[in-house]
Amino acid sequence: MEEELVAVPMVPPARPQPPVLSVRRPPNPPMLEHRFVFDGRAGEYFRIWIVNLALTLLSLGIFSAWAKVRTQRYFYGSTRLAGVPFEYTAKPLPILKGRIIAVTLFSAYVLAGRYSVFMQLGLALLIAVLTPWLIVRGAAFRARYSSWRGLNFRFIPDYAEAYIRFLVLGLPLILSLGLLYPWVKGKQKAFIVENHRFGGSWVKFLLHAGQFYPPYLIAWGVLSAWMFVFTMVMVGVIMVSGAGQSGGAPAGWLVIGMTVVMYLGYFVVLAFLAAALANLVYNHIDIDGRRLRSTLKGQKLLWIYAGNTVAILCSGGLLIPWAMIRLAQYRADCLCLLASDDFNGMVAERSIGVDATAAEVDGLFDIDIGL
């Protein structure tokens, strides 16, 4: 039987593959810690403060614009990062104009209440509608005239988003009976942080609004427990003192004492909350890979607040400069910038002049936009 031959296709030999060379990436440069340093002195600032106070009173408030500039320049210039001081470059005259407009608006609001409730409500509604615009313009003014290493900060206006964060979100906040307050505050803080630029880079906020709940919930829980204990103690004291049995009102000293004790509880909780929120915000700020780190302690901040309050009250206000320097010193000691470069890659950006009116109005009406 003849064997059948089957054709087998020829497979070309595989080409030898070149050896795979592992590419070593350069290791990330180490992050260096650049601490903020505040070298202001109470004696130096007292001389500035007392002159500012005297000239403001003598000029019926006109000098207050120059007083603000002198104060800001002292505190900015006394704060250093990597050995370089910050600068405040605003001029007094625009601030004076803004203050005149702010005082006029506030006076109209107060006087309207004497003649027409509806007029006062109308002005209050107008201020509420203007609030997002004031916040944006105020932040832009402060950023424009704040600088470091000769580079100005910038705040990029986004009015549509500002009205959502600072006005529209007020509706669900009210409907939730305040339960959405931490979330709304987180959205507002994110807006302020993320619209800033410095050295050619956007400032990033690495935090979502829900992360604001833990510090607020802890504060609410402690305050609720404090109010419960305080109420029980207050009822017991009134019964022991006999005021409740006789049907008369508690003695004046008892009312004053209970009021002081009640507010002491609020004071303690607010000091711890302020430290927690400041750390939460600063520790999640990123500027092109550079990170801030804040290490404020609630106990220390409480001690400073309490000492400052007692010192100011006992001195009739003369120790206000000492209190301000003391607080600025502690805040700077607890703040540092982590960076792996020498900051030479930062570039200057075109700056546009910003009117000071909004900054003065939001300051007068105590609109909370700070970090």
Image (tube, rainbow, N blue to C red):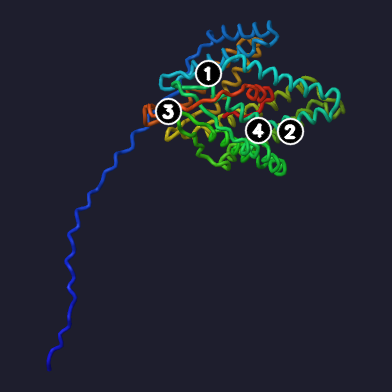
Mark 4 vs mark 3, CA separation in Å: 30 Å
**Disc on res. 132:** 4
- In primary-sequence order, the first of circles 2 and 1 is 1
The residue at the far bottom in this view is: 1
Q: What residue type is labelled 3?
A: Val
Disc 2 target residue: 231
Residue type (three-letter) at the residue carrying disc 2:
Thr
Q: Is residue 229 left or right of residue 36?
A: right
Q: Residues within 10 Å of mark 1 (few under 14, many from 20)?
A: many
Q: Of label 2 and label 3, which has the lower sequence position?
A: 2
Dot in front, 4 or 3: 3
Q: Name the residue under label 1.
A: 88
Q: Is mark 2 on a helix, strand or loop?
A: helix
Is the residue 217 above or below the residue 145 in the image?
A: below
Q: Name the residue under label 3.
A: 347
Q: Residues within 10 Å of mark 4 (few under 14, many from 20)?
A: many
Secondary element type, mark 3? loop
Across and down, in percent, residue 192 comes to: 57, 33
Residue lying at the far left of the rendered structure: 2
Amino acid type for the residue under numbered disc 4: Pro
Seen from the viewer's position, the closer of residues 129 and 94 is 94
Q: Residue 329: x percent and y percent?
A: 51, 19
User: Mark 1 is on which residue type?
Assistant: Tyr
